Amino acid sequence: MNDDQSTSQIGGIAAEALRQLIERIERLEEEKKGLQGDIKDIYTQAKSQGFDTKIIRQIVRLRKMEDHEREETEQLLDLYKAAIGMG
Protein backbone atom coordinates (compact mmCIF):
# COMPACT_ATOMS: atom_id res chain seq x y z
CA MET A 1 0.00 0.00 0.00
CA ASN A 2 1.27 3.47 -0.90
CA ASP A 3 1.74 5.87 2.05
CA ASP A 4 2.00 8.94 -0.21
CA GLN A 5 -0.69 11.35 1.07
CA SER A 6 -1.23 12.95 -2.34
CA THR A 7 -2.51 9.66 -3.70
CA SER A 8 -4.14 8.19 -0.60
CA GLN A 9 -7.76 7.35 -1.14
CA ILE A 10 -10.32 7.10 1.62
CA GLY A 11 -13.65 5.79 0.45
CA GLY A 12 -12.72 6.74 -3.10
CA ILE A 13 -11.83 10.31 -2.11
CA ALA A 14 -8.35 11.78 -2.63
CA ALA A 15 -7.82 12.78 1.01
CA GLU A 16 -4.96 15.26 0.51
CA ALA A 17 -6.70 17.05 -2.37
CA LEU A 18 -9.85 17.36 -0.25
CA ARG A 19 -7.90 18.68 2.73
CA GLN A 20 -6.19 21.30 0.54
CA LEU A 21 -9.50 22.46 -0.92
CA ILE A 22 -11.05 22.77 2.53
CA GLU A 23 -8.05 24.73 3.82
CA ARG A 24 -8.25 27.11 0.85
CA ILE A 25 -11.94 27.69 1.54
CA GLU A 26 -11.18 28.34 5.22
CA ARG A 27 -8.49 30.89 4.32
CA LEU A 28 -10.81 32.66 1.89
CA GLU A 29 -13.60 32.71 4.49
CA GLU A 30 -11.21 34.44 6.90
CA GLU A 31 -10.24 36.96 4.22
CA LYS A 32 -13.92 37.53 3.45
CA LYS A 33 -14.63 38.20 7.11
CA GLY A 34 -11.85 40.78 7.15
CA LEU A 35 -13.15 42.42 3.98
CA GLN A 36 -16.68 42.53 5.39
CA GLY A 37 -15.28 44.35 8.41
CA ASP A 38 -13.52 46.83 6.12
CA ILE A 39 -16.75 47.44 4.19
CA LYS A 40 -18.64 48.00 7.44
CA ASP A 41 -16.01 50.55 8.47
CA ILE A 42 -16.46 52.42 5.18
CA TYR A 43 -20.24 52.56 5.69
CA THR A 44 -19.64 53.88 9.21
CA GLN A 45 -17.31 56.53 7.79
CA ALA A 46 -19.89 57.48 5.14
CA LYS A 47 -22.58 57.80 7.81
CA SER A 48 -20.33 59.98 9.97
CA GLN A 49 -19.84 62.26 6.95
CA GLY A 50 -23.62 62.69 6.63
CA PHE A 51 -24.31 60.24 3.80
CA ASP A 52 -27.36 57.96 3.83
CA THR A 53 -25.92 54.45 3.90
CA LYS A 54 -29.17 52.83 2.73
CA ILE A 55 -28.96 54.86 -0.47
CA ILE A 56 -25.26 54.05 -0.87
CA ARG A 57 -26.08 50.34 -0.55
CA GLN A 58 -28.75 50.69 -3.25
CA ILE A 59 -26.32 52.46 -5.56
CA VAL A 60 -23.69 49.74 -5.01
CA ARG A 61 -26.33 47.11 -5.83
CA LEU A 62 -27.39 49.01 -8.98
CA ARG A 63 -23.78 49.46 -10.14
CA LYS A 64 -23.26 45.69 -10.00
CA MET A 65 -26.01 45.23 -12.57
CA GLU A 66 -25.58 45.30 -16.32
CA ASP A 67 -27.10 48.39 -17.96
CA HIS A 68 -30.07 46.45 -19.36
CA GLU A 69 -30.76 44.81 -15.98
CA ARG A 70 -30.65 48.18 -14.23
CA GLU A 71 -32.98 49.77 -16.79
CA GLU A 72 -35.43 46.87 -16.49
CA THR A 73 -35.37 47.10 -12.69
CA GLU A 74 -35.96 50.85 -12.77
CA GLN A 75 -38.83 50.46 -15.28
CA LEU A 76 -40.48 47.78 -13.15
CA LEU A 77 -40.05 49.89 -10.03
CA ASP A 78 -41.69 52.86 -11.78
CA LEU A 79 -44.51 50.62 -13.06
CA TYR A 80 -45.16 49.12 -9.62
CA LYS A 81 -45.06 52.54 -7.95
CA ALA A 82 -47.55 53.90 -10.48
CA ALA A 83 -49.81 50.87 -9.97
CA ILE A 84 -50.12 51.64 -6.26
CA GLY A 85 -50.38 55.40 -6.71
CA MET A 86 -46.88 56.36 -5.67
CA GLY A 87 -45.69 57.85 -8.94
Image: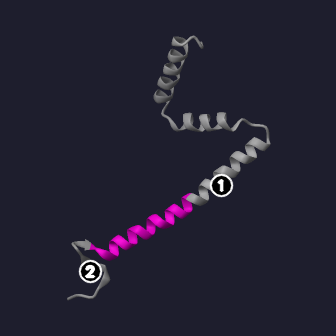
Give amino acid for label 1. Answer: Asp
Q: Which residues are magenta?
A: 14-32
- Residue neighbourhood size for the residue with mark 1, other residues' Cα within 10 Å, grouped as few (<14), some (14–19), many (≥20): few
Judge from the rendering whether residue 28 lies leftward or rightward of residue 3; answer left or right: right
What colour scheme was applied to this rendering of the protein? one colour
Label 1 belongs to which residue? 38
Residue at image point 64% right, 55% down: 37
Q: Are marks 1 and 2 in contact (CB under 8 Å)?
A: no
Residue at image point 53% right, 38% down: 64
Label 2 belongs to which residue? 8
Q: Which quarter of the rendering shows the N terminus? A: bottom left
Q: Which quarter of the rendering shows the C terminus? A: top right
Judge from the rendering whether residue 2 lies leftward or rightward of residue 18; answer left or right: left
User: Which of the two labelled residues, at mark 1 and mark 2, occupies the earlier sequence position?
Assistant: 2
Give the Cα separation between the discs numbered 1 and 2: 40 Å
Residue at image point 54% right, 13% down: 84
Note whether 46 is above or below 18 in the view shown: above
Judge from the rendering whether residue 18 lies leftward or rightward of residue 73; answer left or right: left
Element assignment for label 2: loop
Picture quarter containing residue 9? bottom left
